[in-house]
Amino acid sequence: MSALTESWKELPTSGTPPPAIYGCATSYSGHILYLFGGQDDTAFHASLHQLDTRSMTWKQLSPQHDGGPMTKSECQMLYYNDSLTVIGGYGIPSGELQSGSQFTKCKHHLDGRGGCTNEIHKYHISQGKLQIVLQLICHNLVHKC
């Protein structure tokens, strides 16, 4: 968006872009934009992508882990000290939940199967490794569970 012309301009990109989604979490550091999760009309996602805003190149990151975040949208993501922390979110668990985490179903969305989670994962960017960290209470501002 140009503030001078008050108009949008499409910027071509290359690489491996994320799927067409909404409800994703984003964070920014330097010239790199990070994007996690989100959903489309049929599924929730747990992919992690980065966009180099200098070269306009997308890259899908492949965290090395035993158990990553559940597929979800509406989570929060924070960049700090070469790490991304993904907190909470809304989705449908496809397997076992993160040890110690909680999941609260919401009756008003996705036929009552969806809900909020309080899981927290930390992704170490330079190491390409995912770490399970603290469990906190989920305060989802969009969906009141």
Image (cartoon, rainbow, N blue to C red):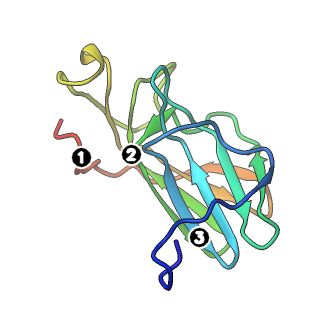
Disc number for residue 74? 2
Q: Residues within 10 Å of mark 3 (few under 14, many from 20)?
A: some
Quadrant position of residue 106: top left
State left or right for residue 68 relative to residue 66. left
Q: Is residue 126 above or below residue 102?
A: below
User: Which residue is painted at 62% across and 59% down in the image?
Assistant: 34
Task: Give me the C-alpha separation between circle 1 and circle 2.
Answer: 8 Å
Image quarter where the C terminus lies is top left
Depth check, front residue: 37 or 88: 37
Image label count: 3
Sort mark 2 into few (<14), some (14-19) or many (20+) by Cα contacts within 10 Å. many
**Mark 3 vs mark 1: which is more N-terminal?**
3
Furthest-bottom residue in this view: 4
Q: Marks 3 and 1: CB-CB under 8 Å?
A: no
> Of the residues under marks 1 and 2, which one precedes in the sequence?
2
Look at mark 3 in the image and give the residue it sits on.
28
Q: Residue at x 50, y 19 (%)?
A: 94
**x%, y% of residue 25?**
48, 53
Residue 112 position within the rendered picture, expressed as x and y whole percent measured from the top left: 24, 17
In depth, the one of 125 and 99 nearer the eye is 125
Pointer 1 and pointer 2: residues touching (CB < 8 Å)? yes
- Residue bearing mark 1: 142
Residue ID at (62%, 34%):
67
* Circle 1: residue type: Val
Kind of residue at badge 2: Glu
Upstream in sequence: badge 2 or badge 3: 3
Q: For the residues marked 3 and 1, what is the alpha-carbon distance in whole angstroms?
A: 22 Å
Q: Nearer the viewer, residue 42 or 75?
A: 42
Of helix, strand and loop, which one carries label 3?
A: strand
Residue lying at the far top of the rendered structure: 111
